[in-house]
Amino acid sequence: MIKAAVIGATGYAGCELVNILSSHKDVKLSYLASHSYQGKRFSDVYPSFYRKVDSLLMEDDIEKAASVSDVIFLALPHGLASKVVTRDILREKVVIDLGADFRLKKRDVYESWYKSEHHSPDLLKEAVYGLPEIHRDEIKNAHLIANPGCYTTCSILTLYPLLKHELVETDGIIVDAKSGVSGAGRSEKTANLFCEVNESVKAYGVAGHRHTPEIEQELSFASGSDVVISFTPHLIPMQRGILSTCYASLKKGVSKDDVDKAYISCYASEPFIRITDYIPETRYVRGTNFCDISFRIDERANRIISIGAIDNLMKGAAGQAVENMNIAFGFDETEALDRKAGI
Amino acid sequence: MIKAAVIGATGYAGCELVNILSSHKDVKLSYLASHSYQGKRFSDVYPSFYRKVDSLLMEDDIEKAASVSDVIFLALPHGLASKVVTRDILREKVVIDLGADFRLKKRDVYESWYKSEHHSPDLLKEAVYGLPEIHRDEIKNAHLIANPGCYTTCSILTLYPLLKHELVETDGIIVDAKSGVSGAGRSEKTANLFCEVNESVKAYGVAGHRHTPEIEQELSFASGSDVVISFTPHLIPMQRGILSTCYASLKKGVSKDDVDKAYISCYASEPFIRITDYIPETRYVRGTNFCDISFRIDERANRIISIGAIDNLMKGAAGQAVENMNIAFGFDETEALDRKAGI
Amino acid sequence: MIKAAVIGATGYAGCELVNILSSHKDVKLSYLASHSYQGKRFSDVYPSFYRKVDSLLMEDDIEKAASVSDVIFLALPHGLASKVVTRDILREKVVIDLGADFRLKKRDVYESWYKSEHHSPDLLKEAVYGLPEIHRDEIKNAHLIANPGCYTTCSILTLYPLLKHELVETDGIIVDAKSGVSGAGRSEKTANLFCEVNESVKAYGVAGHRHTPEIEQELSFASGSDVVISFTPHLIPMQRGILSTCYASLKKGVSKDDVDKAYISCYASEPFIRITDYIPETRYVRGTNFCDISFRIDERANRIISIGAIDNLMKGAAGQAVENMNIAFGFDETEALDRKAGI
Amino acid sequence: MIKAAVIGATGYAGCELVNILSSHKDVKLSYLASHSYQGKRFSDVYPSFYRKVDSLLMEDDIEKAASVSDVIFLALPHGLASKVVTRDILREKVVIDLGADFRLKKRDVYESWYKSEHHSPDLLKEAVYGLPEIHRDEIKNAHLIANPGCYTTCSILTLYPLLKHELVETDGIIVDAKSGVSGAGRSEKTANLFCEVNESVKAYGVAGHRHTPEIEQELSFASGSDVVISFTPHLIPMQRGILSTCYASLKKGVSKDDVDKAYISCYASEPFIRITDYIPETRYVRGTNFCDISFRIDERANRIISIGAIDNLMKGAAGQAVENMNIAFGFDETEALDRKAGI
């Protein structure tokens, strides 16, 4: 039985973390912190947890959290985690950061996309990118796990086998992604009001969204050469879910069979990836830690269209964070994550 | 370990039954039947269950289901269950009917509201109304359990303590209820198309909805005298959830404290009822088997407004059906039902 | 051609006012003011108006607005209008206030429900309650028109003929109303975020909503005696629309025919009221200035259930405000309001 | 004053046609036909039109329609229009077909994508593709106008200036489009039920959607060489609207300024195209005949991302059909189409 802290427990990803961890047979919630709601009970903020998680919300102080916990989950806006994580904490504890601070290996890439200085560049090299399908072995021994972004998890997993197995050209890759509104967080912005989001669809961050370098980093790692993509996220009037529609040019002579084999080779034994005949829909993975992936070949254009779907709060945030904890602490990787979607 | 059959497994309530039962530690799904999709796999119809429930869908034949099962769940349109349930089956098996056929004790009430003859009037007296908060002891020994309707579960639970403890007048009770669209089932009707339901709200079945006599039956039972209510259901553009806003005139001298005591007296030890300070919202119970209830007193009008919320597919259908099974077979009542709602 | 100012032009009701007035053949928009967006163009805030209404947003100063306008629409939070409207302005101009400040005839009723002092009690007696179906003659000569609330317009219109013609008991009236989210305005509140509203329904302001005394005032006026109602509003995951489900006890001997006659007598020549056979749905009036009304008699309970539907931003706010302007300035009452709903 | 018939008046596009035409100052609705609802009133099927359009629905017989009309709108499933349009009708009347039968110039392209024989191949050469921004002059004298598809209108208009002005490579073009559910029509299919569509997003028709050849035909026409695209439509949980996110590789040396000039050159005087600074959102064009277009250049990938938005029932169907009628009959092109979107 380990003890877990969640700092930033009252955001949407934090809430889902609390939800999962409170059902985990090897975990006890030891410290829930919230900047905005300190002093209230968790169930005051999320009444659905009444009589389930009524703990008091504490100060968002990582030292205090660490003093009573084995693992600390940080679900904070970018730029905050790198200010508070210390080598002292990492020596004895495991920190799983759901923010962006430790995802990019190169400080200058971070600083150019995030337009701000990095607060702990020296920690970048010991941070492990927490995508188990690619970095499971490193995660096992990690003390600082950078949990991937929601768009990036979905997009990387969908494209990874194509680049790993050198089936597609490394230039000309396009990721057109669609996300539910919980990905935008719980902050009070006009743009996230019901009447602004409902009954509409929009692109945003066109040609400049910060998840771009994260996708490129991992795809370059897979292919062994620099990959530059175009990434366009869209906002969909629904609460949860991400769909990544990925376009790439097939190399000469690559057949459907080659592609099938690449996906099977990479993912056949993965507990949370389903290679499907049906075209993925976000409702099929809602509430689960699955990433559903399927592809079609457009022979007229010699192009592959690979489509992936995840729940942005699960495999795209809290679910994957718990998966990383399970790996790091030697628990069954699917513990507390073996959920099914219903209707 | 018992074996369970679900007949009508591909409707929304059937799907939720499969979802719950497939996680139940004491149950093995032995027979899933579907009129429309016989021969397909369950996960062909609901791809979210791919690699989780891939069983073949069988003929909707209760005899065949009974031959391989200990409990048979019927999730069928009204009028069908009473055609197929037999004394032979009931002798050895437990039948839990999610339809309306065995809910009303009086044959003539059924026939006048449903405008059709009852096929098995002789079975009515051995059917138990499966609302555990009121009939738990009878359910323990029942072989034919009539699972209550979704509106009725929510409305009865919300009003029951007021009538049981004689705090309100028995005439003048009004139930104004709001339901998500899954309550209308999965049949292909123009009225249930996205573009007909979305961005609108409507009342239907005004002054004639068939859940009325069911609510009256149980409230009359609680109060010991005939209760006549006005019940108006409304359709809300959301998938799941029922909210019942119930109005009743307080008897002279009844205080807020009296009402608090009545609710506590009835429900303090109930695992699935939460008496709340906050006004219930359907999202707080989404995906759970909870019924949240709260009340306010309108002193100007000497009236109590009690509000209850459930998930229509859980406590309003499949969840309560499994709860009934748990009781009838001596399992922990909350087994497989201890879910939390998230965001 | 008259000149019109809108103060509070960037709220949802203000936006709809601009929308209607910019199509009105006898009106020129002379002054659009916004507290939050002063200095921007209207189409910067609402890009749908790009190339249609690109006017600069001015200071929210009623004196400046009045100096260039014949009519001033105020779409402000309550408590502000009564601070800025003066006798000087009213002498020469017409003010149409979409807020609550001048709706209640009795200062003490206002102060007890709004928990604050009234800033211009002396103006209350010259304010006209702008519900044309009841007060058309007074509106013709009014200089200060208190535009009714959204819930109140729908609820009063639905119940008015029943009380005017003494067909129902004056006690025991219940109004259970359902509203889209635009009724809550455009302010940045967590409660109005997409992820908090979508896929849920809730009651709020139970036994204490401020539209209660407004409904009671007009129904008491209709019946000639004090009417006390219970009013419960609910929030629905949709943008626009209000549905009022109204319950009242029929007086002895009142027939369906009597009720039909009462509605016809009151509304036969009304341009914006449709007495319908079908049960109203908010989508049928979306974008229009119609109030659809229908009723059913519940004979078992000797109760009438009257249901009304409006678009809260049209007949419930901006549409009715323009209707009032049309009446006050002698234009055709339906000018710029003759829209149809589509799908 | 001309007389107009609508065959297929009770589908969503048909309904919007009736909506627009009934407000058109130069048009009288002479014949509304419906296969499914013949004998009912239009307002029985769409109660929002009660007291506005109460006409009886007639047999869907083009001869009868033609005998009382100057223009006949056909809003039928594909394959039907080509069976009923005759040279006799076209001699004296104007037929505007909202279906796919006459859009593709080449019979074999039609037959290979639609997998069925064309019924009137001889009429293909006199059909005019009704996209006014490209074919306005031909539309003026046309008797058979093939109204473009919804996805195609949005995608062609967004990409047309880039190909016309030879700014992008003709291979490698990708159109990732998102549509509201009304595009799927009003037929009773499980896939279009509220609970199947809501809270989810999916791609469909991947690498094989029938709007592909239509887009290619017009882009090839613009560029003077064969254009092959990849087109992927997605279904969004909203009623109306299409967003096309279009990706193309910029030719060497092409600057932002060049692109600006190309769009201005093609569209500066177009009444229904808005080149915008803001990224288009479907809500900004909802209910209007506008196509909003904006672009961003992704310099890292040397790629342009052009984004267009329309209302699929307006510029994507009924609005454009009326625009075509306005042109063919010499009316003001914007007559009855000068609507604004609100919130």
Image (tube, coloured by chain):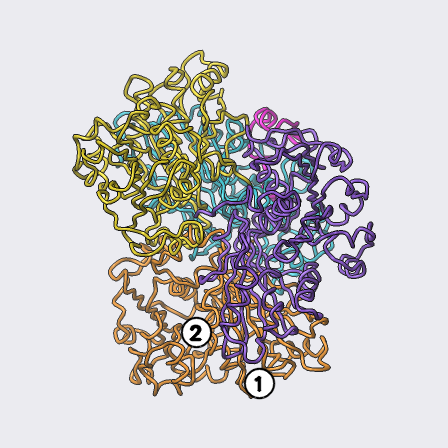
Chain colours: A purple, B yellow, C cyan, D orange
Q: Which residues are magenta?
A: C95-123
Q: Which mark is residue D210?
A: 2
Sooner in the amino-acid sequence: mark 2 or mark 1: 2
Quadrant the C terminus of chain C occupies = bottom left
Residue C10 x %, y %: 64, 50
**Residue linked to disc 1:** D223
Residue A248 x %, y %: 59, 72
The answer to whether D95 appears left or right of B122 in the picture is: right
Q: Amino acid at mark 1?
A: Ser
Residue B25 against residue B259 in the figure, above or below: below
* Quarter of the rendering containing residue D166: bottom right
Residue B135 against residue A71 in the figure, above or below: above
Label 2 neighbour load within 10 Å: few <14, some 14-19, many 20+: some
Circles 2 and 1 on the same subunit: yes
Cα separation between marks 2 and 1? 21 Å
* Quarter of the rendering containing residue D120: bottom left
Judge whether residue C91 can be spotted in this image.
no
Residue C261 x %, y %: 30, 38
Residue A45 x %, y %: 61, 34
